[in-house]
Image (spheres, helix red, strand yellow):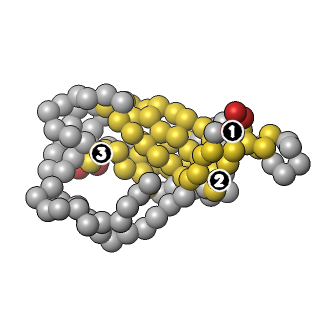
Amino acid sequence: PRSASPTGTPVFVGETGRILVSNTIDENVQVEVVFRNAYTNPVVVPFINTRNGGESVSPRVKDVTNTGCTIFMQEPDHQNHSPETVSYFVVEAGSHVLRGGLVVEAGTMSTTKIHRSTHSFDGDSVL
């Protein structure tokens, strides 16, 4: 996607990608992702496209740099998992108005709150 700069010149703000993650971090599986573009302050959002295996699994991101990141999967019970297709999008942090008026906002938030399935959630809201 592209956004307009104050001068009206298109500015690149993000990209998407898809990878296959063959197992969980508990089995030492991590995938190094190289972005097609360089970013000043990238925000990476991964999500699982498939539903393989009997347990739920969550995609995680670490080691984000302006040229790439590491994506891995994690099961709540710290077991292995079937391969899953993980898509991701990378967006430059900030607020961007794309063609057609669509507003894209991206940022990060740090928290120490943890949610366990047997407890009510009182963590930080993420919108």
Q: Secondary structure beneath disc 3?
A: strand
Q: Which mark is residue 58?
A: 3
Disc 2 crowd rating (10 Å Cα; few below 14, some 14-19, many 20+) is some
Which amino acid is tagged 1?
Gly
Nearest to the eye among marks 2 and 1: give it.
Answer: 1
Q: In the picture provided, is 86 more to the left or to the right than 9? A: left
Which amino acid is tagged 2?
Ser
> x, y (%) of residue 3?
73, 42
| Residue corresponding to mark 1 | 101
> How far is disc 2 from disc 1 in space, using C-alphas?
12 Å
Q: Which mark is residue 95?
A: 2
Tell which residue pokes out farthest to the left in this image.
118
> x, y (%) of residue 121?
23, 62
Residue drawn 55% across and 35% down? 16
Q: In the picture provided, is 125 more to the left or to the right than 82? A: right
Q: Earlier in the sequence, mark 2 or mark 3?
A: 3
Q: Earlier in the sequence, mark 1 or mark 3?
A: 3
Q: Earlier in the sequence, mark 2 or mark 1?
A: 2
